[in-house]
Image (tube, helix red, strand yellow):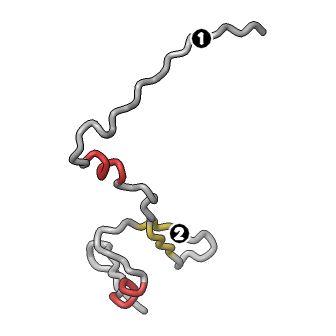
Amino acid sequence: MKTVLDIKGQLTIPKKLRDLRKLRAGERFDVALDEDDPDLILVRRQRRSANAGLLDHLLACPVKGCLEQPPRRVEPTRRVEL
């Protein structure tokens, strides 16, 4: 497949590839040069971590106070002789 670099320096990934890899608008990519081949440009999709967005989801919980930190036990500090 071929594509063209436009005047703003942007490449369009052909629709067939976008559909095949389930790429969506707004996804982020890493771009790198191959040291062995000066004509090769590598593009890799950045994956979101498995729990990305979890904190926002939990903070949106309608039950207030469900995320309060439990009280900590304070234990006296012991001196250790070396």
Check the image and name the residue furthest to the left: 62
User: Above or below — where is 78 with respect to 28?
Assistant: above
- Secondary structure state at the residue bearing disc 1: loop
Image location of residue 20, percent across then percent down: 41, 87
Q: Which mark is residue 2?
A: none
- Residue at the disc numbered 2: 33
Q: Residues within 10 Å of mark 1 (few under 14, many from 20)?
A: few
Amino acid type, residue under disc 2 in the picture:
Leu
**Nearer mark to the viewer, of 2 and 1:** 1
Q: Establish if 33 lies above or below 54.
A: below
- What residue is rendered at 75% in x and 7% in y? 81
Q: How many C-alpha atoms fall within 10 Å of the one at disc 2: few (<14), some, or many (≥20)?
A: few
Quarter where residue 28 is shown:
bottom left
Q: Residue at x 27, y 76 (%)?
A: 7
In this rendering, the answer to whether 79 lies above or below 36 is above
Q: Position of residue 26 (x, y in %)?
A: 29, 68
Which corner quadrant holds the N terminus? bottom left
Which quadrant of the figure has residue 37? bottom right
Q: CA distance from mark 2 to mark 1?
A: 54 Å
Residue occupying image coordinates x 67% and y 7%: 79
Q: Nearer the viewer, residue 52 or 70?
A: 70
Q: Residue at x 32, y 75 (%)?
A: 24
**Residue 67 image point, x, y percent:** 33, 39
Q: Nearer the viewer, residue 24 or 57?
A: 57
Instruction: Classify residue 65 by image quadrant.
Output: top left
Q: Which amino acid does the dot numbered 1 rest on?
A: Thr
Q: Position of residue 49 (x, y in %)?
A: 45, 58
On residue 77, the disc is: 1
| 65 left or right, relative to 14 | left
Secondary structure of the residue carrying tag 2 is: strand
Q: Earlier in the sequence, mark 2 or mark 1?
A: 2
